[in-house]
Image: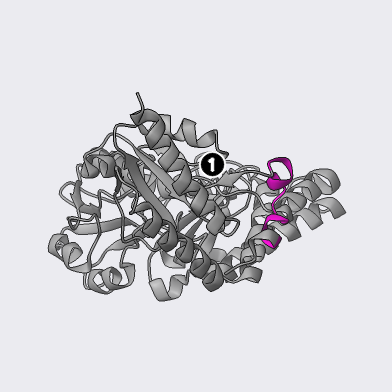
Amino acid sequence: MIDVNEIRKDFPVYQNHANLIYLDSAASALKVKDAIDQVDYYHKVLGVNAHRGAYHLAFETTQLYEAARSTVARFINAAEDEIVFTRGTTTSLNMVAAAFRDILNEGDEIITSELEHHSSLLPWMMTAKKTKARLVYVPLTPEGRITASAFQSVLSDKTKVIALTHISNVMGYRTPIEDIVKIARTKDVVIILDAAQSAPHMTLDVKALDVDFLAFSGHKMFGPTGVGVLYGKKHRLSQIEPFEYGGEMIDEVHLEDATFKPSPMRFEAGTPNIAGVIGFAAAIRYLERLGMDKIDAHVAALTRYTLDKLSQVEDVTIYNPKDTHSIITFNIKDVHPHDASTMLDQHHIGIRSGHHCAHLVARFLNTPATIRASFHIYNDFKDCDALVEGVIKTRDFFQSF
C-alpha cells in the first residue's frame, strides 16, 4: 500500500482541512502541490502567450507548453502531434461528435451504452438527430456490465461510430475495450473512448488499445480544472474539421477562403489554458513517479475492503458489489442520498449524491439517485472505516424518527 501520510503532504488541501475524508475523486481529484506550483510559476514568472512571440518570456512559455504535450504523449504512448489540448473530456468528446455531423448519413448507426456519462452520450445523441443516424445501445448484463458478446450482437454493416466509456463513473466497471476493438475492426468504424475515469488510475497505451480517439481531463488527475486532452490517430484527426476557428490555428487566410495548420494546432484556436496545461503536465509526472500499477493496486484494495465492510451493514443496497476499481455506489433504506451526503459531511466525509451526470444508469438501477464513494491515493483504510461508521450513524439517525 502507498504511504498515505506521506502522500497527503503533497496535497495542500489537507493543511487547511486536516480532518478531511475526501471520497469524491471520481468527480474531481484533489490538487497536488507540484501542479499548483507550476500554475503559480506561469502566472508569477511568465504570464504571456504561447506560440506568438519571439521574446524570452514567450519562448519559455512555448517551451513549457509543448513540453507538456510531450509529457501527455509519453503518458499514453502517443505521438506528440496526436495530442490536442482542450477544456476537458466534455469538450474533447464534443469536438469529435460535432465533426461527424458532416460525415454521418441517414441510417448510419452509432453504438453506445446506458453506462455513458452525459458528455459521452449527449454529443452523439445530438449528432444522430442532426444526421438522422441511429443510436444503438449495447445490452447490459443484469449487474450492469458491457460484454464483448453483447457488443457483437449490435454491431452491423451500418455501424459507423462506437462511443463507449472505459470505466463507468457510476458502476466502476471496466469495459472490455480490447476485445470490443478486435471485433469492431472487422468493420469500417471509428472508435471513441471516454477515459475520464481510467486515466487517473491505470496505464493507458493508445497503440495497444487501438482506439481512434480517446479523451480525459486534468482535474481528475490531481491537475487544474479547465484542461484536458483529445488523443486522435493522426489520419483520423486529419479527417475531421476544427471545432473552433480563430487565431493560431490557420495557415493562410484569403478573402474567400482559408487553410488550416496540421494537427494539433488546427484544433487549438485562440489562447489556450497555458497555466492549466503546464500544471497538468506536472500532475502527470507526479502520477508517473508513483507508478500507475501501484496506484491501481492501492485503490483496488481500498475498494474491496470497503465493499466487504459495507455489505455487512443492514439496510444498505450496493449497486456494484463486484467492482474492484475505485467506485462504490449504494443507497441507505429510507434515506435520500442528498440527506445522507449532508449527514456524512458532519463527519468530515465528502461523498457524491445524485444521478452523477448519468441518467440512463439511474434508470437502469431503477432509482432516481444514489450515493457514490470514490477513492484515490490520499485515502487509507481509516477513511474506509469512517465511511462505514458514518453510513451506520446516518441510517440509525433517520430510522429513529
As drawn, which residue projects farthest toward the front? 400
Q: Report the side of 182 relative to 350 (left or right).
A: left
Quick check: can you spot residue 127?
Answer: yes
Q: Nearer the viewer, residue 166 or 367?
A: 367
Compared with 111, 357 (above or below) is: above
Segment colored magenta? 6-17
Q: Report the side of 139 relative to 316 (left or right).
A: left
Q: Report the side of 179 relative to 119 (left or right).
A: left
Compared with 53, 201 (above or below) is: below
Horizontal and vertical percent for residue 333? 29, 37
Q: Is residue 377 magenta?
A: no
> How many numbered tags mark residues here?
1
Q: Nearer the viewer, residue 115 or 82?
A: 115
* Secondary structure under the numbered disc 1 in the rendered image: strand
Horizontal and vertical percent for residue 384? 50, 53
Horizontal and vertical percent for residue 160? 24, 58
Task: Name the quadrant containing residue 339.
Answer: top left
Q: Is residue 13 magenta?
A: yes
Which residue corresponds to mark 1? 349
Quadrant for the C terminus in the image: top left
Q: How would you rate the neighbour count of disc 1 (Cα within 10 Å): few for under 14, some for 14-19, many for 20 or more?
A: many
Q: Residue at x 25, y 66 (%)?
A: 188
Horizontal and vertical percent for residue 17? 68, 41
Task: Name the quadrant containing residue 368.
Answer: top left
Q: Report the side of 213 relative to 176 (left or right).
A: right
Quick check: can you spot residue 77?
Answer: no
Quadrant for the N terminus in the image: bottom right
What amino acid does circle 1 point to? Ile
